[in-house]
Amino acid sequence: MSVKISAADVKKLRETTGAGMMDCKKALVEAEGDFDKAIEILRKKGQKIAAKRADRESTEGVAITKISDDNTYGVAIVLACETDFVAKNDSFKALAQEFVDIAFNHKTKEEFLAADFGGVTVAEKLIEQTGVIGEKIDITAFERIEAPYVGAYTHVGKIAAMVGLTAVVDNAAELTKDLAMQAASMGATTLSYKDFDPAFVASETEARIAAIKKDNEELVRLGKTLKNVPQFVSRLQLTDEAIAKAEEEAKEQLKAEGKPEQIWDKILPGKMERFISDNTTLDQEQCLLDQKFIKDEKKTVAEYVSSYGDVEVKNFVRVTLG
Protein backbone atom coordinates (compact mmCIF):
# COMPACT_ATOMS: atom_id res chain seq x y z
CA MET A 1 0.00 0.00 0.00
CA SER A 2 1.54 3.28 -1.12
CA VAL A 3 1.67 6.24 1.25
CA LYS A 4 0.23 9.50 0.04
CA ILE A 5 2.83 12.28 0.16
CA SER A 6 1.36 15.74 0.60
CA ALA A 7 2.73 18.94 -0.88
CA ALA A 8 3.08 20.25 2.67
CA ASP A 9 5.36 17.31 3.60
CA VAL A 10 7.52 17.94 0.53
CA LYS A 11 7.70 21.67 1.35
CA LYS A 12 8.70 20.96 4.95
CA LEU A 13 11.48 18.55 3.90
CA ARG A 14 12.73 21.00 1.31
CA GLU A 15 12.90 23.82 3.86
CA THR A 16 14.71 21.55 6.32
CA THR A 17 17.34 20.18 3.94
CA GLY A 18 17.47 22.61 1.03
CA ALA A 19 17.07 19.69 -1.38
CA GLY A 20 15.12 20.02 -4.62
CA MET A 21 11.40 19.38 -4.70
CA MET A 22 11.63 16.15 -6.71
CA ASP A 23 14.45 14.80 -4.53
CA CYS A 24 12.37 15.50 -1.44
CA LYS A 25 9.32 13.79 -2.90
CA LYS A 26 11.35 10.73 -3.93
CA ALA A 27 12.94 10.53 -0.46
CA LEU A 28 9.54 10.70 1.25
CA VAL A 29 8.13 8.04 -1.04
CA GLU A 30 11.11 5.76 -0.36
CA ALA A 31 10.75 6.44 3.37
CA GLU A 32 7.02 5.71 3.18
CA GLY A 33 6.27 9.14 4.62
CA ASP A 34 8.69 8.90 7.56
CA PHE A 35 10.14 12.41 7.75
CA ASP A 36 13.33 11.55 9.71
CA LYS A 37 14.00 8.57 7.45
CA ALA A 38 13.60 10.80 4.39
CA ILE A 39 16.22 13.17 5.81
CA GLU A 40 18.57 10.22 6.33
CA ILE A 41 17.98 9.08 2.73
CA LEU A 42 18.93 12.53 1.45
CA ARG A 43 22.03 12.57 3.65
CA LYS A 44 23.15 9.20 2.34
CA LYS A 45 22.71 10.54 -1.18
CA GLY A 46 24.97 13.42 -0.18
CA GLN A 47 27.58 11.00 1.13
CA LYS A 48 27.60 9.11 -2.16
CA ILE A 49 27.97 12.27 -4.19
CA ALA A 50 30.66 13.59 -1.82
CA ALA A 51 32.63 10.34 -2.22
CA LYS A 52 32.42 10.55 -6.00
CA ARG A 53 33.51 14.21 -6.06
CA ALA A 54 36.15 14.03 -3.31
CA ASP A 55 38.99 14.60 -5.77
CA ARG A 56 37.31 17.57 -7.45
CA GLU A 57 38.76 21.04 -6.97
CA SER A 58 36.53 23.47 -5.09
CA THR A 59 38.07 26.80 -6.16
CA GLU A 60 34.94 28.95 -6.25
CA GLY A 61 32.76 29.99 -3.35
CA VAL A 62 32.30 32.73 -0.77
CA ALA A 63 34.78 34.38 1.61
CA ILE A 64 32.98 35.90 4.58
CA THR A 65 33.79 37.47 7.96
CA LYS A 66 31.96 38.22 11.18
CA ILE A 67 33.20 40.67 13.83
CA SER A 68 31.98 40.87 17.43
CA ASP A 69 29.83 43.84 18.44
CA ASP A 70 32.65 45.16 20.64
CA ASN A 71 35.23 44.63 17.86
CA THR A 72 37.48 42.47 20.03
CA TYR A 73 37.43 39.32 17.91
CA GLY A 74 36.33 38.01 14.55
CA VAL A 75 36.25 34.97 12.29
CA ALA A 76 36.78 34.54 8.55
CA ILE A 77 35.83 31.45 6.57
CA VAL A 78 35.67 30.31 2.97
CA LEU A 79 32.74 28.15 1.91
CA ALA A 80 34.05 26.65 -1.32
CA CYS A 81 32.29 24.99 -4.23
CA GLU A 82 33.23 23.89 -7.74
CA THR A 83 31.54 26.47 -9.96
CA ASP A 84 30.94 30.19 -10.05
CA PHE A 85 27.29 29.45 -10.92
CA VAL A 86 26.72 27.88 -7.48
CA ALA A 87 28.83 30.52 -5.68
CA LYS A 88 26.58 33.30 -7.00
CA ASN A 89 23.38 31.55 -5.92
CA ASP A 90 21.55 33.37 -3.11
CA SER A 91 20.87 30.14 -1.22
CA PHE A 92 24.60 29.31 -1.24
CA LYS A 93 25.41 32.79 0.09
CA ALA A 94 22.77 32.32 2.79
CA LEU A 95 24.36 28.98 3.71
CA ALA A 96 27.74 30.70 4.02
CA GLN A 97 26.17 33.22 6.41
CA GLU A 98 24.72 30.41 8.53
CA PHE A 99 28.13 28.74 8.67
CA VAL A 100 29.99 31.92 9.70
CA ASP A 101 27.39 32.56 12.41
CA ILE A 102 28.27 29.16 13.88
CA ALA A 103 32.02 29.59 13.30
CA PHE A 104 31.82 32.85 15.24
CA ASN A 105 31.39 30.90 18.48
CA HIS A 106 34.38 28.58 18.01
CA LYS A 107 38.13 29.02 18.20
CA THR A 108 39.37 26.29 15.85
CA LYS A 109 38.28 24.75 12.58
CA GLU A 110 38.00 21.36 14.28
CA GLU A 111 35.59 22.74 16.90
CA PHE A 112 33.60 24.48 14.18
CA LEU A 113 33.24 21.36 12.00
CA ALA A 114 32.06 19.39 15.03
CA ALA A 115 29.53 22.06 16.06
CA ASP A 116 25.77 21.58 15.83
CA PHE A 117 23.90 22.62 12.71
CA GLY A 118 20.22 21.84 13.15
CA GLY A 119 20.75 18.43 14.70
CA VAL A 120 23.79 17.41 12.65
CA THR A 121 27.39 18.55 12.75
CA VAL A 122 28.73 21.22 10.41
CA ALA A 123 30.81 18.52 8.71
CA GLU A 124 27.70 16.41 8.14
CA LYS A 125 25.81 19.45 6.85
CA LEU A 126 28.54 19.99 4.26
CA ILE A 127 28.09 16.42 3.03
CA GLU A 128 24.32 16.80 3.01
CA GLN A 129 24.54 20.00 0.99
CA THR A 130 26.95 18.35 -1.43
CA GLY A 131 24.07 16.01 -2.25
CA VAL A 132 21.62 18.92 -2.50
CA ILE A 133 23.81 21.07 -4.70
CA GLY A 134 25.37 18.26 -6.71
CA GLU A 135 28.95 19.42 -6.42
CA LYS A 136 31.65 19.35 -3.77
CA ILE A 137 31.38 22.01 -1.07
CA ASP A 138 33.85 22.44 1.77
CA ILE A 139 35.20 24.85 4.37
CA THR A 140 38.63 25.53 2.90
CA ALA A 141 39.62 28.30 5.31
CA PHE A 142 38.88 29.15 8.93
CA GLU A 143 40.67 31.96 10.75
CA ARG A 144 40.01 33.72 14.04
CA ILE A 145 41.81 36.68 15.61
CA GLU A 146 41.46 38.53 18.90
CA ALA A 147 42.77 42.00 19.74
CA PRO A 148 41.77 45.21 21.54
CA TYR A 149 40.21 46.26 18.22
CA VAL A 150 39.45 44.06 15.19
CA GLY A 151 38.18 45.23 11.79
CA ALA A 152 37.63 43.56 8.43
CA TYR A 153 37.28 44.02 4.70
CA THR A 154 35.86 41.67 2.07
CA HIS A 155 36.51 42.05 -1.65
CA VAL A 156 33.49 40.97 -3.73
CA GLY A 157 33.07 37.86 -1.61
CA LYS A 158 36.29 36.37 -2.98
CA ILE A 159 38.96 37.62 -0.56
CA ALA A 160 38.50 38.54 3.10
CA ALA A 161 40.93 39.97 5.62
CA MET A 162 40.82 40.88 9.30
CA VAL A 163 43.26 43.11 11.19
CA GLY A 164 43.75 43.47 14.94
CA LEU A 165 45.18 46.57 16.64
CA THR A 166 47.09 46.73 19.93
CA ALA A 167 44.88 49.57 21.19
CA VAL A 168 41.61 51.35 20.51
CA VAL A 169 42.29 54.73 18.89
CA ASP A 170 40.20 57.40 17.21
CA ASN A 171 38.98 56.24 13.80
CA ALA A 172 40.07 52.64 14.52
CA ALA A 173 37.34 51.42 12.15
CA GLU A 174 38.85 53.40 9.28
CA LEU A 175 42.38 52.25 10.11
CA THR A 176 41.51 48.56 10.30
CA LYS A 177 39.43 48.71 7.13
CA ASP A 178 42.33 50.34 5.25
CA LEU A 179 44.77 47.76 6.59
CA ALA A 180 42.45 44.85 5.81
CA MET A 181 41.97 46.24 2.31
CA GLN A 182 45.76 46.41 1.96
CA ALA A 183 46.11 42.79 3.09
CA ALA A 184 43.33 41.64 0.77
CA SER A 185 44.67 43.53 -2.24
CA MET A 186 48.41 43.03 -1.88
CA GLY A 187 48.50 39.50 -0.49
CA ALA A 188 50.81 39.92 2.48
CA THR A 189 51.71 36.64 4.17
CA THR A 190 53.34 37.97 7.34
CA LEU A 191 53.37 41.13 9.43
CA SER A 192 57.05 42.14 9.31
CA TYR A 193 60.39 41.09 7.87
CA LYS A 194 61.35 40.32 11.47
CA ASP A 195 59.08 37.27 11.24
CA PHE A 196 61.12 35.69 8.42
CA ASP A 197 63.27 32.61 8.91
CA PRO A 198 66.84 33.51 7.86
CA ALA A 199 67.07 30.25 5.88
CA PHE A 200 63.97 31.23 3.90
CA VAL A 201 65.43 34.66 3.14
CA ALA A 202 68.72 33.11 2.00
CA SER A 203 66.86 30.73 -0.31
CA GLU A 204 64.73 33.53 -1.75
CA THR A 205 67.81 35.70 -2.31
CA GLU A 206 69.51 33.01 -4.35
CA ALA A 207 66.39 32.26 -6.38
CA ARG A 208 65.54 35.89 -7.12
CA ILE A 209 69.05 36.85 -8.14
CA ALA A 210 69.25 33.82 -10.43
CA ALA A 211 65.93 34.76 -12.04
CA ILE A 212 67.02 38.37 -12.65
CA LYS A 213 70.33 37.26 -14.16
CA LYS A 214 68.46 34.94 -16.50
CA ASP A 215 66.13 37.77 -17.53
CA ASN A 216 69.16 39.98 -18.18
CA GLU A 217 70.60 37.41 -20.58
CA GLU A 218 67.49 37.83 -22.73
CA LEU A 219 67.59 41.63 -22.33
CA VAL A 220 71.20 41.65 -23.56
CA ARG A 221 70.13 39.68 -26.63
CA LEU A 222 67.36 42.18 -27.30
CA GLY A 223 69.60 45.18 -26.65
CA LYS A 224 67.38 46.46 -23.83
CA THR A 225 68.19 48.01 -20.45
CA LEU A 226 69.24 45.42 -17.89
CA LYS A 227 67.47 44.90 -14.59
CA ASN A 228 69.29 45.80 -11.40
CA VAL A 229 70.72 42.73 -9.67
CA PRO A 230 70.29 43.26 -5.90
CA GLN A 231 72.64 42.01 -3.24
CA PHE A 232 69.81 41.35 -0.81
CA VAL A 233 66.02 40.93 -0.72
CA SER A 234 65.10 41.75 2.89
CA ARG A 235 65.88 44.20 5.67
CA LEU A 236 66.75 41.13 7.70
CA GLN A 237 69.99 41.11 5.69
CA LEU A 238 70.68 44.86 5.92
CA THR A 239 73.04 44.89 8.87
CA ASP A 240 74.82 48.05 10.02
CA GLU A 241 77.87 46.80 8.14
CA ALA A 242 75.88 46.28 4.91
CA ILE A 243 74.38 49.78 5.16
CA ALA A 244 77.78 51.35 5.89
CA LYS A 245 79.34 49.54 2.92
CA ALA A 246 76.53 50.68 0.61
CA GLU A 247 77.00 54.27 1.78
CA GLU A 248 80.74 54.13 1.13
CA GLU A 249 80.11 52.75 -2.35
CA ALA A 250 77.61 55.56 -2.99
CA LYS A 251 80.22 58.14 -1.93
CA GLU A 252 82.80 56.55 -4.24
CA GLN A 253 80.29 56.77 -7.08
CA LEU A 254 79.63 60.46 -6.38
CA LYS A 255 83.36 61.11 -6.28
CA ALA A 256 83.85 59.30 -9.60
CA GLU A 257 81.06 61.39 -11.10
CA GLY A 258 82.84 64.54 -10.01
CA LYS A 259 80.10 65.69 -7.64
CA PRO A 260 81.36 68.32 -5.14
CA GLU A 261 81.68 66.80 -1.65
CA GLN A 262 79.74 69.67 -0.09
CA ILE A 263 76.52 68.54 -1.84
CA TRP A 264 76.85 64.85 -1.04
CA ASP A 265 74.61 65.23 2.03
CA LYS A 266 71.77 66.27 -0.26
CA ILE A 267 72.27 63.37 -2.67
CA LEU A 268 73.14 60.48 -0.33
CA PRO A 269 69.73 60.13 1.39
CA GLY A 270 68.04 59.52 -1.96
CA LYS A 271 70.68 57.00 -3.00
CA MET A 272 70.39 55.11 0.28
CA GLU A 273 66.61 55.12 0.04
CA ARG A 274 66.92 53.62 -3.45
CA PHE A 275 69.42 51.04 -2.19
CA ILE A 276 67.06 49.93 0.57
CA SER A 277 64.11 49.79 -1.84
CA ASP A 278 66.08 47.73 -4.38
CA ASN A 279 67.26 45.32 -1.69
CA THR A 280 64.01 44.69 0.19
CA THR A 281 61.76 43.32 -2.58
CA LEU A 282 60.76 40.27 -0.51
CA ASP A 283 59.57 42.50 2.34
CA GLN A 284 57.59 44.71 -0.04
CA GLU A 285 55.80 41.69 -1.47
CA GLN A 286 55.08 39.63 1.64
CA CYS A 287 55.26 41.85 4.76
CA LEU A 288 52.19 43.96 5.50
CA LEU A 289 53.99 46.71 7.41
CA ASP A 290 56.79 46.99 4.84
CA GLN A 291 54.54 47.33 1.79
CA LYS A 292 53.81 50.64 0.09
CA PHE A 293 50.43 51.85 1.32
CA ILE A 294 47.97 51.47 -1.56
CA LYS A 295 46.22 54.77 -0.82
CA ASP A 296 49.50 56.72 -0.65
CA GLU A 297 52.56 55.00 -2.09
CA LYS A 298 54.84 57.72 -0.71
CA LYS A 299 54.61 56.00 2.67
CA THR A 300 54.80 52.46 3.95
CA VAL A 301 51.95 50.78 5.78
CA ALA A 302 53.96 51.08 9.01
CA GLU A 303 54.23 54.85 8.48
CA TYR A 304 50.49 55.07 7.82
CA VAL A 305 49.74 53.18 11.06
CA SER A 306 52.04 55.49 13.05
CA SER A 307 49.97 58.49 11.90
CA TYR A 308 47.18 57.23 14.18
CA GLY A 309 49.28 57.62 17.31
CA ASP A 310 50.28 55.06 19.91
CA VAL A 311 48.99 51.93 18.19
CA GLU A 312 50.44 48.98 16.28
CA VAL A 313 49.14 46.06 14.26
CA LYS A 314 48.85 43.07 16.56
CA ASN A 315 47.81 40.48 13.98
CA PHE A 316 46.06 39.93 10.67
CA VAL A 317 44.67 37.09 8.57
CA ARG A 318 43.68 36.76 4.93
CA VAL A 319 41.47 34.09 3.35
CA THR A 320 40.79 33.58 -0.33
CA LEU A 321 39.31 31.12 -2.80
CA GLY A 322 41.46 28.46 -4.40
Image (cartoon, rainbow, N blue to C red):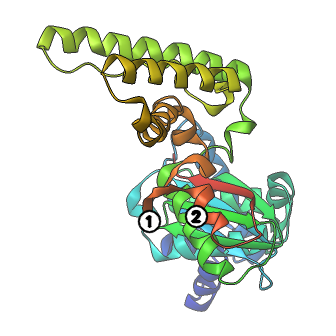
Q: Is residue 230 above or below residue 38?
A: above
Q: Is any atom of residue 242 visible in this view?
A: yes
Q: Is residue 124 above or below residue 277?
A: below
Q: Which of the two residues, 161 or 257, is positioned nearer the viewer here?
A: 257
Name the residue that disc number 2 marks.
304
Q: Which of the two residues, 241 or 238, is positioned nearer the viewer here?
A: 241
Which mark is on residue 295?
A: 1
Residue at image location 78% in from the left, 62% down from the top: 145
Residue 301 appears in which quarter of the rendering?
bottom right
**Mark 2 → mark 1, Cα distance in angstroms:** 10 Å
Q: What is the three-letter code of the residue carrying label 1?
A: Lys
Under tag 1, what secondary structure? Answer: loop
Residue 30 appears in which quarter of the rendering?
bottom right
Q: Is any atom of residue 79 visible in this view?
A: no
Q: Quadrant of the N terminus?
A: bottom right
* Residue 160 in the image, given as x and y percentages of width and height: 57, 62
Q: Which of the two residues, 124 or 49, is positioned nearer the viewer here?
A: 124
Under tag 2, what secondary structure? Answer: helix
Q: Earlier in the sequence, mark 2 or mark 1?
A: 1
Residue at image location 53% in from the left, 25% down from the top: 247
**Residues packed near mark 2 inside 10 Å, few (<14), some (14 to 19) or many (20 plus):** some
Q: What is the three-letter code of the residue carrying label 2?
A: Tyr
Q: Which residue occupies the extreme bottom position in the image? A: 8
Question: Disc 2 or disc 1, which is closer to the eye?
Answer: 2
* Residue 133 in the image, given as x and y percentages of width and height: 52, 61
Left or right for 123, reference 27? right
| Cβ atoms under marks 2 and 1 closer than 8 Å | yes
Residue 123 appears in which quarter of the rendering?
bottom right
